[in-house]
Image (cartoon, rainbow, N blue to C red):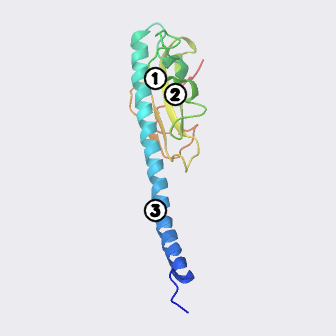
């Protein structure tokens, strides 16, 4: 009987075990890198929302700051108006607080002075869609345009942002 060519079962099992060990080391690093990328994107989008709010209040001083993401966006072809200012991507403006983007949901809420008149302030926020897997930290910002981080990742607690007395209408 001649010598058989090929690999033995033991050799194949050793190769598979080595591949599994390498994968077990690499996968957590990939997940951490994805979370880090999502958080970086979320902080950048909150900065973009700050810029959009400043542009909005400059363009429409009688309205004050925008009270929703929808007012900052607009469907293409976009014609700037106070109800659709064309300042942010329409995908973010229309689905940012529901479907989200880069693992985060986004919101921009206007603050009225005593609940009447134009919006004198805003709160821009980013909250992980799945805390711990799409992101760990929440981000928020108000009129001072400083992006703050909340390590709890919770939607309702923006511990780093100044308290706003009356959000919404």
**Disc 2 vs disc 3: which is toward the camera?**
3
Residue at which label 2 appears: 92
- On-image quarter of the N terminus: bottom right
Q: Secondary structure at mark 3?
A: helix
**Which is more N-terminal, label 3 or label 2?**
3
Residue at which label 3 appears: 26
- On-image quarter of the C terminus: top right
Q: Residue at x 57, y 38 (%)?
A: 155
The Cα–Cα distance between marks 1 and 3, rounded to whole angstroms, is 36 Å
**Nearer-the-camera pick, 121 or 27:** 27
Whole-percent x, y for residue 86 in the image: 46, 16
Q: Residue furthest top?
A: 62
The Cα–Cα distance between marks 1 and 2, rounded to whole angstroms, is 7 Å
Whole-percent x, y for residue 167 in the image: 56, 23
**Nearer-the-camera pick, 143 or 66:** 66
Residue at which label 1 appears: 88
The Cα–Cα distance between marks 2 and 3, rounded to whole angstroms, is 32 Å
Q: Which mark is residue 34?
A: none
């Amino acid at each position: 009987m001649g010598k058989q060519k090929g690999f033995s079962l033991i050799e194949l099992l050793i190769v598979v075990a080595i591949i599994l060990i390498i994968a077990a080391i690499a996968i957590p690093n990939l997940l951490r890198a994805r979370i880090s990328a999502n958080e970086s994107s979320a902080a950048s989008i909150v900065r973009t929302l700050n810029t959009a709010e400043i542009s909005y209040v400059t363009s429409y001083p009688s309205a004050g700051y925008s009270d929703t993401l929808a007012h900052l966006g607009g469907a293409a072809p976009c014609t700037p108006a106070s109800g659709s200012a064309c300042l942010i991507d329409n995908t973010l403006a229309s689905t940012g607080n529901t479907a989200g983007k880069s693992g985060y949901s986004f919101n921009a809420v206007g603050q009225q002075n005593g609940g009447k008149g134009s919006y004198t302030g805003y709160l821009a926020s980013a909250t992980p869609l799945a805390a711990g897997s799409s992101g760990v930290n929440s981000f928020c910002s108000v009129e001072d345009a400083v992006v703050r981080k909340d390590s709890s990742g919770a939607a309702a607690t923006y511990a780093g942002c100044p308290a706003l007395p009356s959000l919404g209408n």
